[in-house]
Amino acid sequence: MAASACAGQDGDGGEVAKVADQSATASPTASPSVRPGDFTGRVDNPFLAFAPGTKFTYDLSSGDGNGRDVVEVTHQTKKILGVTTTVVRDRTYIGGSLVEDSHDWLAQDRDGTVWTFGEDSKTIKNGKVVSTEGSWQAGKKGAEPGIAMLADPKKGKRYVAESAPKVVEIRAEVLSRNASVTVPFASYRNNALEIKETNSLEPNVVAHRFYAKGVGLVSTEVTGGGGEKMELVRVKRP
């Protein structure tokens, strides 16, 4: 999540929150010591809230063609490393055909940081699964929980978004808290959050993601690797 974070916070965040501080300046060297008690049963970060039953629809243009991306917050959960995660389904359609179907596993700690515990990704062709490349799960094969959204995403903060050896190594940096972006859903002037993501396994690919408080991800612009642009069209809430 595609769509693909709490550094620098004081308080009662536990061991997992400390790992976020360390990841701001260095690559992860050891798996976080996850304590299930540090996590809540909800994902309600102002910039990345996932209430079960919510559905986000995006217009999509890429090197593979034009289509849409549909993100649905399911009522399902999955326990990973003792943490109960929320299952978010992300489906990509090109020219009306389903080409990717993934399930992302997310959980929020008590400080408000949203963590990703992996994803089950399937590439679809002619209605059949042809690849599971990009799939990973924290705690398996050296993969670690990553940060999907910081509790307080201040400009200049850097963190590890995803870390699964030989699968994905995404680093993120908060570029702005007052960016401007216009998408079919709405216009945001000087109040959008902009985050830059890079993947060391795809060094020529750079993603800029824009988030609106109270809404979530509203736009993604990817350069390199064929390029991609995704814009929020509508949100359906339960």
Image: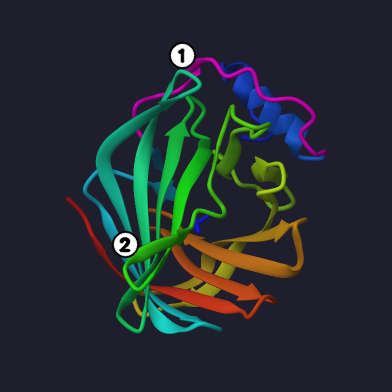
> Which type of secondary structure does the marked residue at label 1 adopt?
helix
Q: Does the magenta stretch include residue 176?
A: no
- Residue ranking furthest to the left: 238
Which residue is depicted at the point 67% across and 61% down?
196
On residue 165, the disc is: none
The answer to whether residue 31 is magenta is: yes
Residue 8 seen in the figure = no
Q: What residue is shown with label 1? A: 37
Judge the density around disc 1: few (<14), some (14-19), many (≥20) Cα neighbours within 10 Å.
few
Quickly name the residue at label 2: 56
Give how far apart the Cα atoms at labels 1 and 2 are: 30 Å
59 in relation to 76, above or below: below
Q: Is mark 2 on a helix, strand or loop?
A: strand
- Seen from the viewer's position, the closer of residues 193 and 227 is 227
Image coordinates of residue 22 in percent, x first then y, are 76, 31
At which x and y percent is residue 30? 75, 25
**Kind of residue sitting beneath label 2:** Phe
Most foreground residue, 13 or 229: 229
Note whether 43 is above or below 180 in the view shown.
Answer: above
Q: How is the image coloured?
A: rainbow
- At x 43% / y 74%, what residue is drawn? 231
Depth check: give the residue in front, 77 or 215: 77
Magenta extent: 26-42
Determine whether, in the image, residue 1 is placed left or right of residue 223.
Answer: left
Q: Main secondary structure of the magenta part?
A: loop
The quarter holding residue 18 reads top right
Q: At which x and y percent is residue 165?
A: 71, 42
- Residue 183 image-quadrant placement: bottom left
Q: In this view, does 127 lie above or below 72?
A: below
Looking at this view, is 67 or 107 the one in front? Answer: 67
